[in-house]
Image: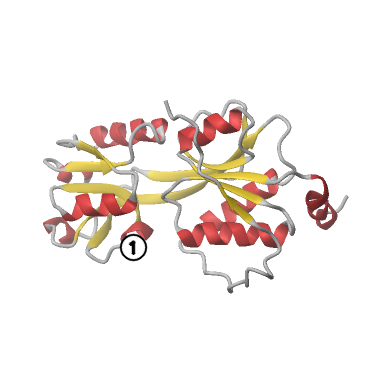
Amino acid sequence: MGLLRRLRHFVVVARELHFGRAAETPAVTLRALLDGLASRAPGLDVDLHELTSAEQRRMLTEGRLDVGLLHHPVETAGLRTGPPVDVPLGVLLPRTSPLVRAREVDLAGLAGLDLVTAPPATAPGWHEHLLAVCRRQGFVPTRVRHARNPEFLFGLLLAGGAVAVEPEAVARREPRLAWRPIVGTPLIKRTSAAWPDRSPHPAAPMFGQLAAEVLAVDEPAPAPAIAPAARPWPVLFEADQTPTG
């Protein structure tokens, strides 16, 4: 069966696609993913969930989620993953910081500052990896402060005395913050699509390739607006009530 016929076959035999993504996924990236699905699998319903990497992994292994976007390192037993995409991370800090004068920042030069990052429960493997690399590079934060919401993260940084380690694109969302690469690039953000290895959704491998293509673009260009009546698929937004403990 040819690729086009297989994609058309999705709309006949496949249930809706339950798709998990993290809260910090940029709107332009999410839009590019949804538009890509609309183009490659016309008629496929998308049931979108806002979940942490840890929640996604659990629901994928339980068969309650069809596809997700996971931050590595993460346990992938029972899962298949698409091509990973690596994005270099740098230091995010207020433009008033003296560190902004340097073209690159050494992690050891952040001594005496707090580190703002996502709570460990959101992506345990990444949280441990981040702190381990910081320690090896000579940066032991005075405090580790947790922020899931980007606006809260920005607020903590602008208050002073703290830095974050993020992709460069994050700095573009707040003009009062600056981004500087880290000497030696010791930290990268690796993300890949994932889906259950048993009875996967027929569209899952296609989504894995699409996610790699979209995530590899620094800032995906917005697609032309589609009138609601003309959109070939509905997106169903559902708040997940699954306990995180």
Circle 1 residues within 10 Å: few <14, some 14–19, many ≥20: few
Compared to 63, does 216 lie above or below? Answer: below
Identity of the residue drawn at 33% across and 40% down = 118
The colour mode here is: secondary structure
Q: Where is the C terminus found, in terms of image quarters? A: top left
Q: Is residue 25 left or right of residue 201?
A: left
Compared to 63, does 46 lie above or below? Answer: below
Residue 183 visible somewhere in the drawing? no
Q: Is residue 198 left or right of residue 24?
A: right
Q: Amino acid at mark 1?
A: Arg
Quick one: 10 or 143, which is closer to the camera?
Answer: 10
Looking at the image, how many numbered discs can be counted on the residues? 1
Could you say where residue 19 lies in the image, as x and y percent from the top left? 59, 45
Could you say where residue 209 lies in the image, as x and y percent from the top left? 64, 50
Identity of the residue drawn at 33% across and 43% down = 186
Quick one: 42 or 104, which is closer to the camera?
Answer: 42
Quick one: 160 or 46, which is closer to the camera?
Answer: 46
Residue 65 visible somewhere in the drawing? yes
Quick one: 90 or 49, which is closer to the camera?
Answer: 49
Residue 73, image quadrant: top left
Identity of the residue drawn at 49% across and 34% down = 55
Look at mark 1 in the image and give the residue it sits on. 173
Could you say where residue 215 lies in the image, as x and y percent from the top left? 52, 54
Could you say where residue 141 lies in the image, as x and y percent from the top left? 18, 37
Q: Secondary structure at mark 1?
A: loop
Identity of the residue drawn at 67% across and 31% down = 197
Q: Is residue 66 left or right of residue 3?
A: left
